[in-house]
Amino acid sequence: MRESSYKSSTQTLQSPFRGGEKKVMKKSLSLLIALAMVFGMFASMASAATTELTTAQKYQWFVDQGVLKGDPSGNPRLDATLTRAEFATIVASVGGLKLVNSASSFSDVKVKDWYFTAIQSASDAGLVNGIGAGKFGPKLNVTVEQVIKVAVSLAGIKPVDGAVVAGSSAWAGPYIQAAINAGLAVPSNYKSNATRGQTIDVAYVVTQLKALPVLSDVAATVNADDTITVSGKVVNTADSVKVALGTAAEVAATLKDDKTFTYTTAKQTPGTYKLTVVAYDGTKASVAVTKEVTIGGFVVESATAVNNKQIAIKFNKAVQEGISVGGATYALNNNAASNVLLNGVAPKAASISDDKTTVTYTFAPFANNTYAQLEVKSGYKSASGQSLTAYKTAILLNDTAAPTVTGVSYAGNTATISFSESIPADKLGTLSINGSTIGTGVTSSVYYSANVDTTDSLGWVKGITVYNLTLGTNYSFYLVGGADNVGNRFDYNTTLNAPTDNVAPTITSLTVNGNVITAKFSEAVSAAGSVYNGSDASSKVDGVRSSDNLSATYTVGWMGSNSFLNVTAVVKGYKDLVGNTGADFSQALTLTKDSTAPTIASASYDGTYIVIKFSEPVTVNSTANSIGYSWTNTNSVVNGGNWSAASAVAGYDVNNDGDTNDDTENYYIRVTPSTSVGAGSWTITVPEGLAKDAAGLKNAKASSSFTVSAGSTSGIIELKNVTLVNNSKIKFEFNRELATSALDVSKYTINGVALPTGSKLYFEGTQYFVVAEVPAGTFPVAGSRVVKVNNIVDTSGNTLSDKNSTTLYFNENVAPVAQTVTLVSDKQLNVSFSETVANNGAVTGVEVFLNGSTTAEAGLTVVATNGIVTITSATSKFSPSQTIAVKFAGSNVADSAGNTASDITINK
């Protein structure tokens, strides 16, 4: 059947039979059952049936139920194909369609034909079309892809525009793809003829399952913060949709009245994820739909020079504002701490795009049309906490774009005009209003001020503010001859019209904390007014406006010696920016004397900081005693220690918006741990007086516990330190607990060469420390060497950052070897070495054996002097005729580099 053969409809289908038997269909089988049958016609439904029957037995079951009328010959003809006429009877019978047009619409369908009513009623209902030339083709066979198209249309599932499915006709692709997306298993023989037996199999299963919900348009999308959103809709009845991530338990999605649903996971680490979606009608489940998505790494997509001091860095994911443009993890003007460097120099300021994926950094002005190296370090994090793949590139610093005006805003009788980039104050050009030049003199009727960009130290202008405008009046404004630092010029003109404002401000809330009253206003105010205790004029306290002029605080001294005081606070005299005075506002409040010291509410680890939350706003006493910790790692190894209180800072960027000024963010203290924070159970002990509230009350000593899960840390391994324990023993310290695969000599190189065969690697104390013992002679001469670590992972599978190498000065580690024994006299032996020994004085670990004796000679004095070892006896003991053996075992003889002598036995 060609593409135009069937039209979309809300009707459903069921299997027809004709030939020797006349098909009689029970309308008690619902349209929904019929629809499920058509979909399931090509699905493997065996597992859903409660009893496995052959196709013939299922056919007989329908006959026994009176749904079908048996064939008098006893032959169900299960392998026979379906004709277009038979298929049309599905729609007419199950849909209960009524004949509208008593005349035939097709030249090959006569009123006397048995299928006339079915075909014509389906045509009248707009469900089927002809094949062209005024014909219907009733005896042509129905193909699989034609049935899929009709089923998808009847289900109300939207075809996937432009979809191409291999093996199908071009017109069928959108419908087949829609069926697949809805979780319907369809075969690949789309152009094959549909059979009667398939219909019987499916019809039987459907009668067992009844009304099965169907999923449609299911999609899974990775969000910028590494969460995954699953969406779609349900067709037919469904009261819930559940989503399973991998092997995790199902979680309910949000199902809306319009039958669409969404579900968003928590933040995920990089990897490939399978999500399984199932719709439910009570306990009846739809065919599951699975979607697979991949979360990639966090990378820089591009970096471009915006002008001669700004670089725009585009990331593939949303970034942490706190680490990008300000807040708890922010560093500017600090070449050592900054995560962004241009030719090794940190930026002076930063701003972020609305979608959080582009950060524009401001540097000191750079020479135009030159190249510089931009570096973005792995310490940079995405919004989900994923560490960046370190990025370096040569960037062309070429500024050819003139500044522009990005917007005009009004506040009272002022207008602020903002520029796309800050420009030197002496390049602002000429400003005029209504044809007359204006200046910065405040005595003028209309004047302006330059708005200095305070985010850097350049003192350049980021815009201007024009003052003393008459509200509701049009002003013709011109800026002529403006230019940026490299001479790109711009002009600008507009009509300024500060809107008329006759609406007075109001107080939206009045709250109290201790003896501090806070008012929030409906708009920015130019005056906070005063607060009174009722009608007592002497109780007047003036307010202090917030930086955004949207609130004000009033610190009152009305309590005296009372522990609490009920008052009626009356705020008067507050004004908006054009001088409208707000109505007096009164509210009953209870002032309380703060006698409660701050307490610890919780503690956690965010991958960088230990974050301690208190019960109220606090400041830090950095001279308090140290913060203690104990840690039980995932291998039940217990460690403990202390962190300095000097690393504690008040305020924490809870919502990661780049500042610590939001509600409750002043409840926090963040501590920079001086040790690695690995997976396991942690308990910190906060010393007395680390935190202090506004009343000066200090916290008591207390403990709080938290768990650090494997993989919950920042996700980057860094080589923190490399030390030489001795000339042959190197100790590596990492910030993560390493996997045992790290004990591989090929992963540690010195001057690009792997550690030599015979080197011994092991963890010392914890899996944060790797010790490498190299054989004697590895370093034949002293000198500086580059030590590097490669291709290691931690216990969570995190990989190494670019902080993986260091340069150390190695002493030579060639051990002195005893070479000859010289008989000096009957009382003295001298032993010489492969190199001059450095120590003088008593020597240990030396024995002498005479004439093959297994017992060492006693009463000998062994000393090192003048670069050799001398062995003396108080009595005559040695003679030329003797066999004399000298054994060195664990001797303290050493060379100038501290290498002790090799164990050896030499003979005279």
Image (tube, rainbow, N blue to C red):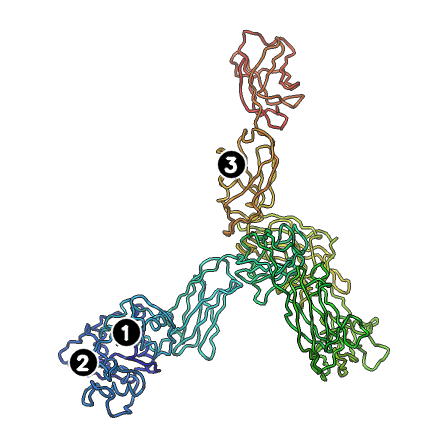
Q: Which kind of residue does numbered mark 2 sit on?
A: Gly
Residue that carries the numbered disc 3 in the rendered image? 755
Q: Is residue 544 left or right of residue 419?
A: right
Pinpoint residue 397: horizontal percent, then vertical percent.
60, 56
Q: Which mark is first along the chain, 1 or 3?
A: 1
Q: Are marks 3 and 2 in contact (CB under 8 Å)?
A: no
How crowded is the residue under tag 2: few (<14 C-alpha within 10 Å), some, or many (20+)? Answer: many
2 vs 1, front mark: 1
SS category of the residue bearing label 1? helix
Q: Which mark is residue 70?
A: 2
The mark that comes first in sequence, 3 or 2, is: 2
Residue behind mark 1 = 202
Q: Secondary structure at mark 2?
A: loop
Q: Quadrant of the C terminus?
A: top right
Neighbour tally class for label 3: few under 14, some 14-19, many 20 plus, Cα within 10 Å:
many
Of residues 54 and 562, the one nearer the viewer is 54
x and y percentages locating residue 528 in the rendered image: 77, 75
Residue at the far right in the pictured view: 538
Q: Position of residue 885 (x, y in %)?
A: 54, 15
Q: Kindly tell me whether residue 699 is visible in this rendering.
A: no
Q: Residue at x 63, y 70 (%)?
A: 406
Amino acid beneath label 3:
Leu
Q: Nearer the viewer, mark 3 or mark 2?
A: 3
